[in-house]
Image (tube, helix red, strand yellow):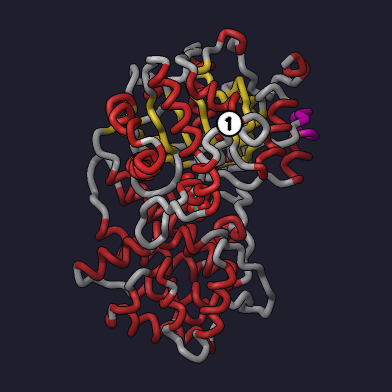
Amino acid sequence: MENLKLLPETVLKPSFERDKIKTSILHIGVSNFHRSHQAYYIHELMEKFNELNYGICGVDLLDSDRKIYNILKDQDGLYTLYTKEPNGAHKAKIIGSIVEYFFGPENPLAVIEKMTSPDIEIISLTIAEDGYHLNEITGALDLNQPILDEEIKNPFNPKTVFGYLTQAFKLRKLRNLPGCTILSCDNIKSNGDTIKKALLEYVSKTEPELLNWISKNTTFPNTMVDRITTITDFNDIETLKQDFFIEDQWPVVCEPFAQWIIEDKFLHKKPSWEKVGVQFTQNIEPFEKMKLRLLNASHTILGILGTMSGHKTVYEAAIDDNLMTFLKSFMDEEVHPTLNESNATHVSNYKKMLVSRFQNPHINDRLSRICQESSAKIPIFILPIITDQLQNEQKIKGAAFIIAAWCKYNDGIDDHGNTYKIVDSISNTLIRMAALSHQNPLKFLDIETVFNDLNTNTFFTETYLKHLNHLRTHSISESITA
Ligand code: CS2
């Protein structure tokens, strides 16, 4: 903190008194995205309005997060948000809203105690799809996963968000304390409803007498979250050193755009986050659908088709004319008809803005980041578009092309003969089914955890087959323009 004074004028530093901050948010999952989004908004509220009531206590639950824990401890919770504008302007801002930090694997009881503190009004989450431990087919909590089984047998040594919340709620009830708002900030459909349903399933199995208390003492707003945040690379750390004299072990790099829409469903007084651009709404669905089906689906498309064409970043893929022509017509003809155009959503403007966000030349967003865990992303971002279009007997040509291309993607060789790695929790299955598809082209669609019963729709499978056959002997750009 003392070192901040040594930084040049060009670096934006917290001007508020960090020791006056009250910690009323406990956030689980201090990812880059959390640091570029929620922690940034809260910092803005502190900086611009001196509202110091929503300080964040960061918590990580996974062993693999030890590095960020050590770094944030070392840096007194401070880190740099490094924003890059399309015109090349760069901004370095030191974010000061994370004021405490706990690490579950080191001291689970301290985390439970903190979660029980009456000061904590909001427990927010960015735990990614995996953190919800859902069964891919039924969507219900998958109590057969070994981590949950082990945790249920050792409730005082929790591992997952469910074990922690259950213990904290038990204590809150026992101590006659109020409950809190559980605010999921994950990029999944109906994130608030999803965590609520999974938590209630867990509690009914482990502590059924707590169910009634939870229903009266917690709320689960759905949210839509957005800010393109890259994986920090070594060059960014170096540039910050050279251009801004900042020594930060793990800065966060992102675009200037940010959006956060939250269902107005807080247990305590609603935070005045609208002052810093957060939008509260009664109905999150149109916003959420628009973001998942336009931004995230487009990312997946650029990721798969771009990697196969030999591109490395979203920017490179987004200035490839063939890919963009395909993407724009997919957005117009197959996605837009499934969305509700309204004054609130402005789908047409949103599409235009997306293209310029993707074409920001200074955001080094690797396609390898986008393609990670496609088996979890495609069912959220792309398949619902196909389901809606099929239901309305509308076009699925582009979507079938994307799925056929994804099958070929899992062969791991691009159109120039270079290889790349498939990074996915079911990579073995993807690679095996893609290989079997060379003899039996519909085989890939048999991965039920991803495609459900899509392989029974002959309208879809016929179009898919046509594309896959063409892709077998042609490159992505030849197939797109065919
Ligand atoms: C990306 C998202 O992971 C992905 O596939 O589409 O991380 C995207 O960058 C964010 O949702 C932007 O808000």
Examine the structure image and report whether residue 242 is included in the region drawn in magenta.
Answer: yes
* Residue 6 at least partly seen: yes
- Seen in the picture, residue 274 relative to 260 is either above or below; the reply is above
Choose between 378 and 244: the one closer to the eye.
Answer: 378
Examine the structure image and report whether residue 406 is included in the region drawn in magenta.
Answer: no
Q: Residue at x 28, y 26 (%)?
A: 216
User: Percent x, y for residue 185?
Assistant: 44, 38
Choose between 285 and 294: the one closer to the eye.
Answer: 285
Tell whether circle 1 marks a residue whose Cβ is less than 8 angstroms from ligand 1: no
Q: Residue at x 67, y 80 (%)?
A: 417
Q: Residue at x 32, y 72 (%)?
A: 453
What is the span of residues highlighted in magenta in the rendered image?
A: 241-247
Q: The C terminus appears in which quarter of the rendering?
A: bottom left
User: Percent x, y for residue 465?
Assistant: 40, 85
Q: The N terminus appears in which quarter of the rendering?
A: top right
Q: Which residue is label 1 attached to?
A: 59
